[in-house]
Amino acid sequence: MRSRTTRRLLEHLEAYLFLLPALVILGVFHLFPIVYAFVVSLLRWNMIDPVRPFIGFENYRHLLSDEKFLLALANTSYYAVVSVALAIPLALGFAILLNRRLVGMSWYRTAFFIPYVTPLATGAMVWHWLYNPDRFGLLNYLIGTIGIPPQPWLLSPAQAMPALIAVAIWAGLGRDIVILLAGLQNISAEYYEAAQIDGAGSWQLFRHVTLPLLSPTTYFVLVISMIGAFQVFALPLFMTGGGPLNRTLTIVYSIYQQGFQYFRMGYAAAQAYVLFLIILVITLMQRQVAARRVHYDL
Amino acid sequence: MANRRGMVWRVLAAAAVLLAGLVGPAASGGPVTITFWHGMSGVLQPAVNELTEDFNKLNPGIVVQALYQGNYGVLNQKLIASVAAGNPPTISQVFPTWTDQLIRAHAIVPMERFIKGPDGLTDEQLADILPILRQANTFGSVMWTMPFNKSLYLLFYNVDLFKELNVKVPQTWDEFVAAARALTKEEGGRVVRYGFVVRPVTDYFTTMMLADGGAFTKPGGREVAFNGPAGVEALQWLADLVNKHKVAYVKPGFADDDFGAGKVAMYFATNPGLAFAKAAVGGKFTVGLAPLPYKTTRSTLLSGTDVAIMARATPEQQAAAWKYIRFITGTTGTTRWSLKTFYMPVRRSALDSTLMRVYLRDNPEHKAGLDSLEFARTEPSMAEWQEIRDIIQEAVELAVLGKATPQQALDQAAAKANRLLAQRK
């Protein structure tokens, strides 16, 4: 007589077998690397040297005094705060405009979404041309026609990051608009009718009906935008190589540089763990705020 | 229930079939197949393929697969990852700094083993390889790699424009500034053509530092010396071309497109840049090559990669790899390679060959490149130098953009570089 548990296990065997491929993939490509990266972050290792001394938390200690990493941290925060703070109101404005009944509206919506489905590498290439410094670039030509002298753009330590942020907003706006538009269309017309009967004007409608009822969507966009912004990598890789003077060096770029250009795997893994902690803390903070500010109903 | 159990068996059977497929067929006899990973793109890739196809035809027992991996940065990443994964190619292009890292990881075998082996090179054949190249491939008195695509920094210039404006090819720094001024052209307050372009990259600075008698490191190689008087003067000179004389502009990327479009009259690049320059110019004018301008010391910097044989390969593969390397770096191989790609031939006999003489008779301006060979210098080859190059580049950017004086920028860079070198065991 088999025990109950064995029999139950056998009954579920089939289900486990079906789960197996997914579990193997998750385990091998997600869970194992997470654990292994932590182990690596405690080593000094160049990926191929058979000698890889265990150095405890030395890599983490080094991070705190590494000017280049701290600069990357500052750059990334600057990028995240400015790009998200500009992108969400902008996307909301466009979403409201696109939420009207107008001839050719689907054409406008598509136009806003195209940058998002354009591969970032392609978009970055085109922008790199537009930002050509000196007298030869298109953007410099355009501002020249209104009397502004040519700008160095990506060559200037001060202008490079704002230039990247502009491209990031251009590339990501379509996604935010589509999500916010869906949120707007989910708000029941009854709320607006009720408010109008009470004599609310269009600003009051926006302030007291649209904004609160859109807040779950806005919150969602905020969280994914922040997480995405802290992981920014492709734009500086394609457009500036982290320069000039490391002013567009971001955390993920720094991880890439340490890991795959200087082959300091331990140090790169430590930076990756710090990035993970930063994103975790920011997301938790956002949840705290959201608990008070997000309304699912009026 | 029986149906269910049948299902389980079917799933298990399917899994077994899958596993069997993964294990794969056992190795069989036949020709030795070896792989050669390289980063030769554009016009250079067909040249690699042509040499490889010829070798395969001449050696029926060996199949060499020359595989383009992406630019040098990507090649580096793939090579290190493949070594870590225990599945490297048989041969790879390597920069000297990579060689240093690979030797420490026991990932490559010394070329000397094959050079001195039964199928090796005679003393004359070895001595025929240019001394600076032999030296650049020697680590701790052992020749670990073989020079393959080596290049030198040269001055590229627009021959037609020089003739038109009656400008002579500059030899010294002062002549260079005068030439750049003559070549710079303004129209209605706007510069439409610059004499020179400063790429804020390490090699623009280090070549000029060498041309002023400077050195990369202090004797012994434990501390850097690029922040000495020669380095400071060289960086000041480059910054002045842009900011004081206003005869040059700053561009981080390659200059050949601007050169082809007539936006700039002179720039520095290495020999294979000629193929790219010619492509960009498209026959609109003649591309000239000359030695780099100098202050006190005629010099140039050796660049380009070598080839290494990986330790993981089987003895048969390694023997086949050596045969291939002997072929592509032999007199005929390196001459053909050089004529196709404008890389330096690695052997003196190639410089003296009929093919090369005929070519130089038809293209006399290219003699300058070969003449630079006698005063070429090499960069330090320790693995750390790869990061130090980036540190130097930062200093060059700081100075050229006017964010720091050359002295401040280079001193900062030297302090960082010395910290890295101090960690080296």
Image (spheres, coloured by chain):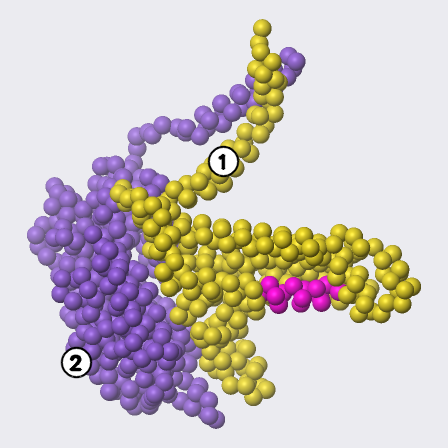
Chain colours: A yellow, B purple
| Placement of B389 over or under B191, stated as above or below | above
Count of numbered marks: 2
Quadrant of the image containing the C terminus of chain A: bottom right
Q: Residue A67: image x %, image y %?
A: 37, 64
Query: Residue sitting at 16 percent across and 80 percent down?
Result: B296
Image disc number at residue B329: none
Q: Is residue B197 left or right of residue A157?
A: left
Q: Residue A177: in sight, yes or no?
A: yes
- Magenta residue check for A281: no
Q: Quadrant of residue B336?
A: bottom left
Read off the magenta span. A83-96
Location of mark 2 (residue): B296
- Report the predominant secondary structure element of the magenta stretch: helix
* A65 displayed left or right of A137: left
For the residue marked with disc 1, what is the amino acid? Gly
Q: Is A22 on the left or on the right of B124, as rendered?
A: right
Taking A106 as reference, is B33 above or below it? Answer: above
Q: Which residue is mark 1?
A: A27
Q: Secondary structure at mark 1?
A: helix
Whole-number angstrom distance, CA of label 1 to CA of label 2: 63 Å
Question: Residue lying furthest right in this view?
Answer: A197
Rendering coords of residue B333 (x, y %)? 23, 55
Q: Mark 1 — on which chain does it sit? A: A
Is B314 in front, or is B33? B314
Q: Chain of mark 2?
A: B
- SS assignment at label 2: loop
> x, y percentage for residue B24?
41, 29
Name the residue at 41% across, 58% down. Answer: A254
Q: Residue at x 23, y 37 (%)?
A: B316
Q: Return the residue found at the far left.
A: B123
Indicate the amino acid at tag 2.
Thr
Q: Indicate the position of residue B42 as horizontal and vertical percent values.
A: 39, 61
